[in-house]
Image (spheres, coloured by chain):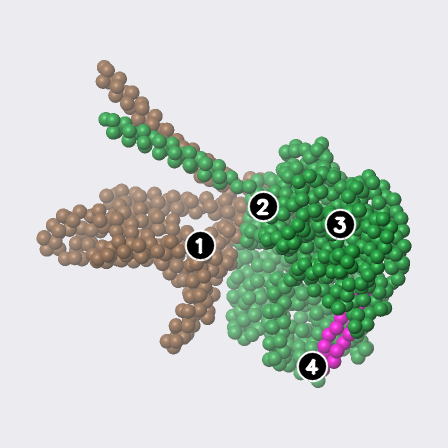
Chain colours: A brown, B green
Amino acid sequence: MRAWKKSCRKYRFNCRSRVLFLLPGLIGVSVFVLLPFLDVGKRSFQTAITGEFCGVDNYVTIFHNQAFLLALGNTARFVAVGLPLLLALSLFLACMIDRGIHARWWKAVYLFPMAVPTATVVLIWKLLFHQNGVLNGLINRFGGTAVDWLGSDASFWVLIFSYLWKNTGYTIVLWMAGLHSVPVERKEAARVDGASERQCFFYVVLPELKPMLYTITVLSFLNSFKVFREAYLVAGAYPQQKMYLLQHLFNNWFTNLEMDKMAAAGVCITVVFLVGVIVLQRLWDRKE
Amino acid sequence: MKRSSRKKYLRKGISALLAAVLALSMAGCGGTEKQNNDIVSSKETAGTNDISVTAKGRYTETKLEIPQYFQGKGEMTLLSDGNILLLDWENGTKSISKDKGMSWESETVQELKQLAANGNVEVGGAAAPDGGLFIYYIDWSESTEEKLFPEKYIYLAADGSKQEFELGLEEYRSSVSRAVFSADGRLFVADENDGKIYEINLQGQSAKELFSVEQIRELSLCAGSAQLAVLDGYSVNFYDLNSGEITAEDKLLNDFIKEQSSKKTGIVMCPGTGEGEQEVLYLASAGGIYRHVIGGSVMEQLADGALNNLGDPTRTPVSMVQPEEGTFLILYDNGELYSYVYDAEASAVPEEQITVYSLYDNETVRRAISIFREKYPNVFVKFEIGLTGEDGMTENDAIRNLNTEILSDGGPDLLLLDGMPVDSYMEKGILADLSDTVEAWKKETNFYEGILEGYRQESGLYVLPFRYDIPLIGGAEEYLSAISDLKTLADTAEQIADSAQAKITVLNTYTAEELLERLYAICEGAWVTEDNTVKEQALKEFLTDAKRIYTAEQKNLPADKKEEHDELIANALNYYSEEEMKKVMMEIDQGVNSQMVGSAVLAAGYLGSMEAFRTFVSEREKIAETMDNYQLQIWNGQCERVFCPTGIVGLCANAQNPEYALKFIETLLSEEVQQEDLGDGFPVNRDAFGIFTQNPEPEYGYSLGVMTENGESIQLNLRWANPSEIEELNQLISLLNTPAETNNLVKDSVISIGVKALTGEKEIDESVEEIVQKISLQLQE
């Protein structure tokens, strides 16, 4: 009986302490994220300033808005191209480094782009990608034709390059953490069983990296939105069309007080993002 | 066990410490809105920030009687017995007030009166604390090669004795322009030509050079019992009266001077006279009245310029004294004298408030605030400026901050919409419809209706222009009669460039950017439809015609002239910002000047002030000596009858105080405000046009010296426009009815890409495509 009581008290204490620990965070998230988002949801059915109910007009408007469709398309294209490239490139480099020497030194080098201030990056980008910049100088020297990197469709690849340059190092570090968690015994056992390096990677290492892949994918996806900073500072509020992302649009909408469109677009994007994350999680859970 | 308990306590201790650090850092994050922490507001702390705080205590402004016939050219001095002495240079009188400026007893100073009566004499001086008078004067009729500045001096001592002497500063090649007595009666003078400061020994009748200031914008002296302060318009230089040494630079004060000097009003100083105030300096400027301990770290704002006449750009303070603690007397250049007395019972700000928001400072609004304050003393007009130039904020950042305010229902009452998304604000219902109010005003006031209602839409009138520039083109009738739009201008430019009448340029533009800048305002309206789509054909025509004009401009332009021009611009950029330079380059008087010296055939640009019109008519007269058919007309591009708004105002639909906000707009458009030519555009109020176009300084003459392309020197007296020329201008203004776009986003895209099209770096079709792509994005959003 005393033991039961003690156990009950311990259970209550544990519950209370969990709640107490969770409460500040929950309150913070509710006040600063959930409630504002509910307000955004409400505003998406209202006019911008007068706050009159307008049904789904705002949703209809944004899906007829060429700028929104362009920004949505560009952002989706950017994620679709940039994310797999980043994951593959960083995994490849992580494996190379993992097998090589001076791994720590390499880690420091790969994290360097994250430490460079955006303003500096922007200056370098301008020097590099200007029509009369360093890159075109090199192209001309080798007999090629100069490219208007920031004023033509090539600007999309500048954006991808910028994203890869900035995030590869960080992603490598994450992959390496995953690689180090793969039991050496399993790899050795596979090798003893006659598995080649390739087979060892695909059948032993890669399955072990799956949980890490989920985290890295979500983090890289979130980081992909940060490329806007460089794009905005290099090319301004209205860059070449291929560089025009959802953040450009939201930024300009706010300047023009298009709160109704912003709210509707915000809700749509959140829904897409949530669905994406849930689907991703389900897929992982099922495979595991 | 013990160790684990110690660990537990250690962990708890660290947690508590971290929590405390977090709490403190969060408290530290609560920033203050004040941008310059060095400038603090005392007594009126609540003054301009929060009307809801019922703080008490403010310097109240009262207009005082001035001695009869006093016109404003004079100086006040605080005497050692506490009386105030006011010298009148024009009438040769000195007036004494024994009751802090409430009443005056005047007497004629014969020596001064005689000098003032002689129109050839330039006179000035200073009063000693004991009432003695030091007078310096130059009789220009005595000026010779040897004595270029034949300056003489008179000292009328308080005991009635008189000394007359000459110093021959720099062997009569220099002269005194400012004088001041220190509290112990030492006399200091400044020479504006060389920037030298001297101490004059009245007994020995000699001058001793103390030091000199390097650059002078506006010189004034102030001396107390410990320091002599010399303000050169950029900084204040201090000279220690006891040690005779130059005091170390007062950086805070100098930064303050630089900031305040950028405003149109001047700065006056007076020394602290209270106990322990030997090292205290009081300053009055556009920002208000400030107290500063020399070398100290604070500029203490005693009175806010926004709450009194100091913030009025049409008034310049010329003299200030502090008869007792908490009281200042300030004399303005228009002869008005005001007292500023600390009233502990007055509310820190008037009870009612309206807020006017603008991205940039605006002289006309400041003038309107001053007039409005006189009409409605119970209302405080808070003038918020988004871009002060001090914090690196961009236009977009400022607009986003404003939008946040508007969305939180705390926005301003009135918006000055220059550079703002006007269309979006009208469409979103941010602005109130002013149709009915304007109709009522129109019954009592005569406006240029085409301009006032230039922004009228089907749904109403949300925006009112209150100042604008006029696009004009001038030249020989044979050319001007053929010019009616951009295409005919291009035809004529080509014809001129190929003819024998060709000069270095046609329109006085030297680069593609200059040309596009000038053409933009009169053409932009033709490219965008009402449903926000771009008319590609119109844009293509614009670039095609602009390229034709550019080719004509460059055809006879020698490389050395182009280099000369670039050098001139580069040098000018040392003194002006890029935006100011662009504005100057676009002024019509620049064009007519080029016509006069023979470097351009046509003058095309924008007219924004009567000063510029003075230059225009004078130069036109000179040109007319060789051309009898000079014509001036509104410059039409792809759009007709365009005016360029330099001030547009709108009433916020959710204004906190719409009644007073409307009264403020009424004041802004009133004759009283509109009649002032502040160099920022012409009046919308037709009744004010008469006074606006009057010469404010008929007694002063200006001249201009230029060298023609043939090496001939022209000395031109600039005369004011005569009634027929003013009527000609009035008729031209009456034609205007289409506002030019003030949002720079489209302009930047068109000019940056258009330059490549004009210089041949890109094909026109390619450029049009790129511009359309960029503009479309903006329009489709």
Q: Check disc 4 and give the amino acid type.
A: Ala
How many other residues sit within 10 Å of disc 2, few (<14), some (14-19) or many (≥20)? some
Task: Look at mark 2 in the image and give the residue it sits on.
Answer: B297
**What whole-number distance in Å separates the C-alpha atoms at marks 3 and 1?**
68 Å
**What whole-number distance in Å separates the C-alpha atoms at marks 2 and 1?**
42 Å
Closer to the camera in the image, B503 or B776 = B503
Q: Earlier in the sequence, mark 3 or mark 2?
A: 3
Residue at the spot 77% in from the left edge and 43% down from the top edge? B80
**What whole-number distance in Å separates the C-alpha atoms at marks 4 and 2?**
62 Å
Residue A229, percent from left and from top: 45, 54
Residue B353, percent from left and from top: 68, 39
Task: Look at mark 4 in the image and give the residue it sits on.
Answer: B502
* Chain identifier of the residue bearing label 3 in the image: B
In magenta stretch: residue B715: yes
Q: Are marks 3 and 2 on the same chain?
A: yes
Q: The N terminus of chain B appears in which quarter of the rendering?
A: top left
Report helix, strand or loop for mark 3: loop
Disc 3 or disc 2, which is closer to the eye?
Answer: 3
Task: Look at mark 1 in the image and give the residue it sits on.
Answer: A228
| Quarter of image, res B418 | bottom right
Residue at the spot 20% in from the left edge and 51% down from the top edge? A205
How many other residues sit within 10 Å of disc 4, few (<14), some (14-19) or many (≥20)? many
Q: Are marks 4 and 1 on the same chain?
A: no
Report helix, strand or loop for mark 4: loop
In magenta stretch: residue B416: no
Disc 4 or disc 2, which is closer to the eye?
Answer: 2
